[in-house]
Amino acid sequence: MASDDLLNSWKRTEGFLLDARTHLSEAAEGICADEIQDFLGYLEHNELELALDALEDAFNKSEFESWRVLELLALAAASMGLTDRQEKYDRTLTKARGWNYKTVLPS
C-alpha cells in the first residue's frame, strides 16, 4: 500500500498535469487528439511520466500553446523528481522569455 506522502505527491503531480491539459489551445484539441487521448489513458492508469510525455508531445506538435503549459509541465516534472526534464523546460522558458526562469514547487 502506498504511503500518504506518496499518494499526496501523485495527486499534486496529477493536478499539475490536468492543469496543463486545460491550458492547451483549441487548435491542440484537433491537432493533438491522439496525444491527448494517450494522456488521458496514462493518467487513468497512474502512469504520470508517460502522461507528461504525451502532453509534451502535444505542446511540441501544436506550436500554438502558451508558455503556461510548459510552466505546468515543469512543475509536474519537479513534483516527480525528474530534475533533468524540469531543467530542460526551465531552459526553454528562459530562452523564450529572455530572463532566467526557475521552477519552484509550492510549499
Image: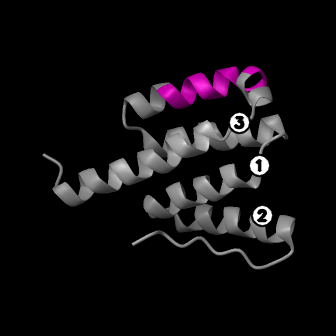
Q: Secondary structure at mark 1?
A: loop
Mark 1 highlights which residue? Answer: 66
- Does 16 sit above or below residue 5? above
The residue shown at (71%, 24%) is 29
Q: Amino acid at mark 1?
A: Ser
Q: Nearer the viewer, mark 3 or mark 1?
A: 1
Disc 3: CA contacts within 10 A as few (<14), some (14-19) or many (>=20): many
Disc 1: CA contacts within 10 A as few (<14), some (14-19) or many (>=20): few
- Does 44 sit above or below residue 68? above
Instruction: Tell me where residue 81 appears, x and y as whole percent.
Output: 45, 64
Mark 3 highlights which residue? Answer: 58
The C terminus lies in quadrant: bottom left
Q: Is residue 39 magenta?
A: yes
Q: Mark 3 or mark 1, which has the lower sequence index?
A: 3
Q: Amino acid at mark 2?
A: Thr
Residue 57 or residue 71, whichever sits in front: 71
Q: Amino acid at mark 3?
A: Ala
Instruction: Tell me where residue 7 appears, x and y as whole percent.
Output: 25, 50
